[in-house]
Every structure is written in C-alpha cells, then in structure tokens.
Amino acid sequence: MQKKGLAVVAVGGNALIKDKNHQTVPDQYQAAADTMAHIATMIEDGWDVVVTHGNGPQVGFILRRSELAAHELHEIPLDYCGADTQGAIGYMFQQALHNVFLERGIKKSAATVVTQTVVDSEDPAFKNPTKPIGSFLDEAQAKIKMEKDGWTMVEDAGRGWRRVVPSPIPQVIVEADAIRSLIDQGFVVVAVGGGGIPVMRTPEGKLVGVEAVIDKDFGSAILACMIQADLFLISTAVEKVAINFNKPDQRWLDRITAAEARQYLQEGHFAKGSMLPKIQAILKYLDCGGKAALITDPEHIKDALDGKTGTWILP
C-alpha cells in the first residue's frame, strides 16, 4: 500500500445526528459507524488520518440535563461540557473504527486525544458573544440568569430567550505534538472535538478553561497547520460547494484556487452559518502552507479523493 500522506478530516454534525428523528445514543453510534466506514476506506487507500468533529447538539443535551437537575446537582461549566463530549464522541468513533478495521482486516488502532485550544483573552469575541447555546427560556427566566449568573441572553426570532457565548478564533492546539506522535506511531487519531476545549494562558503560562465555543473547522485548520497535514478534508452535508446557491444560475464548483475562493467569499456566495466558516478555515490552512483542501459528503469521500466529485481548493 502506497502512502498518500496525512489528512485531517473534519466531520460535520451529520456524522452523528442524521436528522431530528435520530438523536438517541444508538442512533448516533449508527451514524458514526456509517461515517467511519468511509474514513476506513481512506485509510485502506494509504492515508494517515486525524478525525476531528463538531459537538454542538451533544453540548446542548448536556446543558439541558444540567438545567433539569439544577435543583439537585451543580451546573456543568461549558469547558467541561466540551471535554465530556470529546470523550463520548471519541469513544463512539474509536469503537466504530475498531469494528470496521476488524471486519476488513486493517491492522490499525484508533485513539482519542482530549484536546485543548488556546484562545486570546483579548479576542473581540469576548466583548461580543454571538454563539447561541442551550435551551430557550422565557423572559423572566432569562432575566434571572442575566442577573444571577452574568449570562448574556438574546431574544431569538420569537422563539424565546437563549444564552449566547463568545466564539473566539483558535490560536494553538495544546496537544498537537501528542497527536503528531500518535500518527507517527501508526494510530488513527480522533482529536480537536468541537474545535477543542477553549483555554487561555495566564501570564505565568498556566492554562485555564473559558466559557466559550470554538468553530470546529477553524480548530481543525489550526491542527492541520501545526502537524503539517497534506490534505484538509471537510466532510459535510453536500457533495460539492456551489456559488449562486439555490438561484437559477447556481453553479457547482469542482476545483478552485484560494484566490478564487477569496473572491467568491467577498461576493457573498457562502452562507454565514454553513459554508462560510468552512471556506474561511480552508483559506487559513492554505495560507499557512497547506497543500490541498477538499469539501464533500461522507458517502463521496473515496470518489472525491479519486478526482470524480467534491470541491477541491488549491493554493
């Protein structure tokens, strides 16, 4: 088997929750197993792989449980929610990979690294929290949370009040060296879950957790830079990226340069909550010397790597 190189594969929410009717733990495991089967094919074809993932819904579930149990138990800080989900999702991915490796006779093991991501205490996001998390509350409940716990709450499109937290730009992946060492020893690594657990450095260099969330594609891009990955692959809900999306002149993109991606970005082709951060993350990776990036859905990873589909973005 010829070595293809090192890939960071950022899997989207559909790798765990396919739709609103399939959110239980067994449903999530089945979705994870389906996605890991596609990643196992990459590994069979000669790629070393680090799998990164989101955790938004899972953090939401933990926060909801915490709210429901608040009369009996302490509430769970956001950084601990991130750590919890990294362990649970890592467990699902590791087990799914182990089982598919066994079925196919692939001599590989998977390991999960609980990953911390350093953010800048001066990041403007801390003065302007925008990322909604947790349950919807009525106005009276929201006021109590704002006064008692210092939460920032916003009214969300008539559906109620919701907590918003900062989403700072990731700077450094603390465990990057450990991840690289595991890859060099032949492991498949699951890391940077939910973009990493946000931490800050004190003036003495110590790490402290912060109440924030990190975009998982941005966190994955920083990791891809730090471990000098040959490929940054974002696996999402669409087979390819489009410009003029859902308009009569919609056009699917097969292969574009970073300069073209920047132009489409400036022209406003990519939606804020979906494709925009993915393209921004890829540009960050290519700017630090990355070789190639690819966006496709899990089912088309093999075909996309063979050049048959997907959207390639090159320096």
Image: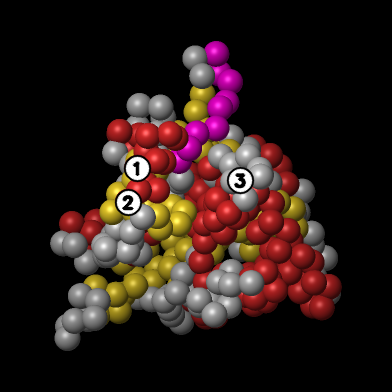
- What secondary structure is found at the residue carrying circle 3? loop
Q: Is residue 97 above or below residue 196?
A: below
**Circles 2, 1 touching at the beta carbon (< 8 Å):** yes
Image check: 59 left or right of 270? right
Label 3: which residue? Answer: 71
Residue 115 visible to an observer of this rendering: no
Q: Residue furthest bottom?
A: 248
**Marks 3 and 1, how far apart in space?**
19 Å
Mark nearer the N terminus (3 vs 1): 3
Which x, y percent locates residue 91? 73, 58
Label 1: which residue? Answer: 143
Image check: 178 left or right of 20? right
Identify the amino acid type marked 3. Answer: His
What residue is shown at x 46% (from left), y 54% (from top)?
134
What residue is shown at x 55% (from left), y 18% (from top)?
205
Residue 146 visible to an observer of this rendering: yes
Magenta span: 204-212
What residue is shown at x 43% (from left), y 68% (from top)?
295
- What secondary structure is found at the residue carrying circle 2? helix
- What secondary structure is found at the residue carrying circle 1? helix
Query: Residue 166's image quarter?
Result: top left
Q: Is residue 85 above or below residue 106?
A: above
Identify the amino acid type marked 1. Answer: Lys
**Marks 2 and 3, how far apart in space?**
20 Å
Which x, y percent locates residue 212? 45, 41
Who is closer to the viewer here, 152 or 303?
A: 152
The local crowd at label 1, few if under 14, some if 14 to 19, many if 20 or more residues have their Cα within 10 Å, is some
State the mark number for residue 139.
2
